[in-house]
Amino acid sequence: MPPDPPTPSREFLNGARNTLPILLGVVPFGLFFGALALEVGLTPIEAQGLSLFVFAGSAQFVAVDLIRQSVAPVVIVLTIFIVNLRHALYSASLAPYVARLPFRWRAVMAWLLTDEAFAVSTPRYRSTDLERAHWHFLGTGLALWSCWQLSTAMGIVFGARIPESLSLAFALPLTFLAMLIPTLVDRPAWAAAVAGGVLSLLLRGLPHGLGLVLAAVLAVGIGLAAETASRARRPGEVGHDQR
């Protein structure tokens, strides 16, 4: 007789527990974001609001850097949209598993979908019993969301005590590099990263920060072209994703 499937509460707790190792890496970035947001002139409420409503670390850091440069708000919003386009791929990957769920569930899962939540939840969706897998995702997503809010709040409190003479702006490029380097695992990723860096330098003279937006769009296209070419050379591995 097969064992009974896990209860919703057990699935939820398993999802949260499986996220714990990742939270160790999330906390420092949340702390730094909260402090940096104050450094560029945001109020504590505005800084916490970015984490509450955007909830996307890389996009938030990009937004803060653009705010520091006094870039037009419409460009900031457009840039965040481009940076988060990868979430459309995550959604497409999970769609077959969540299509049967009510809209309220799909809306919550879409809100909580991040790189980390996708990475933790993907193995769960590869199992055979998927009836309550969405509870596992909920535990994962809420654990990440709660950790990000708390670490941001702590960063805001800490950042408010940093003397104005001690600038944190120098650390922003280092943070981007820390987030970027672990993702450079194949040629398409390297192609997109190098192209984005070179193009952002070449186009930096465009007004209103549009150079960064255009560089990001072109870099994504170059990375996609490299990925397509790589798969074309490996016809037997079309469904394989090295990332």
Image (cartoon, rainbow, N blue to C red):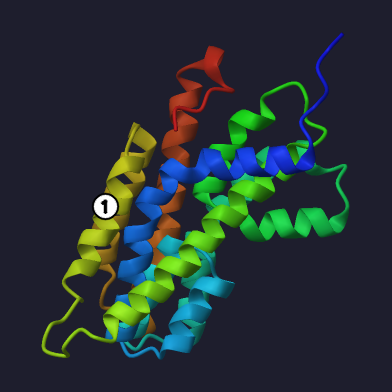
The residue that appears at 50% across and 23% down in the rendered structure is: 232
> Label 1's element?
helix
* Residue 210 occupies quadrant: bottom left
The residue that appears at 69% across and 23% down in the rendered structure is: 127
User: For this rendering, which residue is in front, 193 or 42?
Assistant: 42
- The quadrant the N terminus occupies is top right
The residue that appears at 45% across and 59% down in the rendered structure is: 217
Q: Can you identify the residue that label 1 sits on?
A: 178
Horizontal and vertical percent for residue 53? Answer: 58, 74
Horizontal and vertical percent for residue 193? Answer: 31, 49
The residue that appears at 16% across and 81% down in the rendered structure is: 167
Q: Which residue is most to the left? A: 165
* Residue 34 occupies quadrant: bottom left
User: Label 1 amino acid?
Assistant: Ala
Horizontal and vertical percent for residue 237? Answer: 53, 17
* Residue 158 occupies quadrant: bottom left
Residue 95 visible, this orientation = no
Q: How many marks?
A: 1
* Direction from residue 237 to residue 63 in the image, left or right: left
Residue 230 visible, this orientation = yes
Up/down of 127 relative to 164, above or below: above
